[in-house]
Image (cartoon, rainbow, N blue to C red):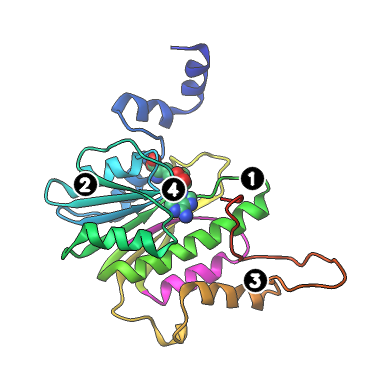
């Protein structure tokens, strides 16, 4: 092993632990800690892992759901095969990917959606947090679309502007929503996970027929943050929260 590997392992016990137990990513321990606390995946569950590459969460989901469960992982990037899981390369925000997921499910119900989805980070916190908020909100809408009533949803978020809008949108769709910060997250990280249990048969009236994305957009507007940039004549760039991503940003 290289000197660098020893140095990194000494600094990061979760990385060391993940390697020694055969997990592909240290993040596997974040899901394990979420599972220990909330038992989000039960034996025989059908689970969708959105943003699954390189496959650490998928490995844990396969272990927890057991041989009678079905685990589907999806990511923009190709993920090496995980025994017991079905993997899709695709953009989870696109309808064509959802069609593939539905076809893998066949007549089966989906009990759990887990998502550690993250944009490729730019290093500019506000930008990364805004893109992450958009992704997590999109994944919430996807989860609502595919989960059975009573189902469970877990997603990553970064602390910052607009997060309360996402929490509210989740509370309008699940009877129990909690935030959880696993100790396996890096100390410097501002990530936190939303654990949403018991999907309601339909969204609460407060959601007023809006998608989670529309609710979060409305929340950002109420904070004075432009969500759909307008063409401005004076060349001033407005403060932008939620917006469509260009391929380059992904
Ligand atoms: C932090 S990694 C996930 C790590 C994974 N949980 C594990 O334990 O191995 C976040 C992933 O989200 C994926 N991602 C980002 N945007 C996506 C999108 N629109 N559709 C699917 N996957 C996406 C990225 O490609 C990246 O692999």
For residue 76, the mark is 4
* Lower position in the chain sequence, tag 2 or tag 3: 2
For marks 2 and 4, the one nearer the N-term is: 2
Q: Is residue 235 visible?
A: yes
Tell which circle, 1 or 2, labels the residue nearer the N-terminal end: 2
Query: Is residue 142 depicted above or below 16 in this figure?
Result: below
Quarter of the rendering containing residue 246: bottom right
Between marks 3 and 1, how big is the CA–CA gap? Answer: 20 Å
Which residue range is magenta in the image? 153-173
Q: Farthest residue to the front: give it.
A: 96
- Residue 114 percent location from the top left of the image: 35, 55
Based on the picture, tell me whether residue 194 belongs to the magenta stretch: no
Q: CA distance from mark 2 to mark 4?
A: 24 Å
Which sits in the foreground, 123 or 189? 123
Residue 159 visible? The answer is no
Other residues around mark 4 within 10 Å, as few (<14) / some (14–19) / many (≥20): some
Residue named by callout 1: 122
Mark 4 or 1, closer to the camera = 4
Cα–Cα gap, marks 2 and 3: 39 Å
Circle 4: element type: loop
Relative vertical location of residue 104 with respect to residue 204 in this rendering, above or below? above
Q: Quadrant of the N terminus?
A: top left
Q: Which residue is mark 2?
A: 64
Please, is residue 204 above or below residue 185 in the view? below
Q: Secondary structure at mark 1?
A: loop
**In 3D space, how far apart are the residues under numbered discs 4 and 3 (Cα atoms)?**
25 Å
- Where residue 78 sits in the image (x, y, percent)? 39, 40
Give the label on residue 227, or none: 3
Q: Of the two numbered discs 3 and 1 on the same chain, state the one appearing first in sequence.
A: 1
């Amino acid at each position: 092993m290289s000197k660098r590997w020893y140095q990194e392992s000494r600094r990061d016990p979760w990385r060391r632990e993940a390697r020694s137990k055969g997990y592909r990513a240290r993040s596997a321990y974040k899901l394990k800690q979420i599972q220990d606390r909330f038992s989000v995946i039960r034996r025989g569950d059908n689970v969708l892992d959105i943003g699954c590459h390189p496959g650490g969460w998928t490995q844990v989901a396969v272990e927890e759901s057991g041989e009678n469960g079905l685990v589907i992982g999806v990511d923009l990037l190709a993920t090496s095969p995980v025994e017991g899981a079905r993997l899709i390369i695709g953009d989870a925000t696109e309808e064509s990917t959802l069609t593939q997921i539905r076809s893998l499910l066949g007549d089966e119900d989906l009990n759990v959606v887990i998502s550690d989805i993250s944009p490729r980070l730019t290093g500019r916190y506000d930008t990364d947090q805004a893109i992450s908020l958009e992704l997590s909100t999109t994944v919430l809408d996807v989860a609502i679309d595919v989960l059975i009533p009573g189902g469970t949803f877990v997603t990553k978020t970064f602390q910052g502007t607009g997060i309360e809008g996402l929490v509210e949108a989740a509370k309008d769709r699940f009877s129990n929503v909690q935030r959880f910060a696993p100790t396996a997250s890096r100390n410097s990280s501002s990530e936190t996970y939303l654990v949403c249990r018991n999907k309601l048969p339909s969204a609460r009236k407060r959601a007023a027929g809006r998608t989670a994305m529309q609710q979060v957009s409305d929340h950002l507007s109420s904070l004075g943050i432009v969500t759909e940039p307008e063409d401005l004549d004076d060349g001033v760039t407005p403060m932008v929260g939620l917006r469509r991503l260009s391929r380059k940003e992904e």
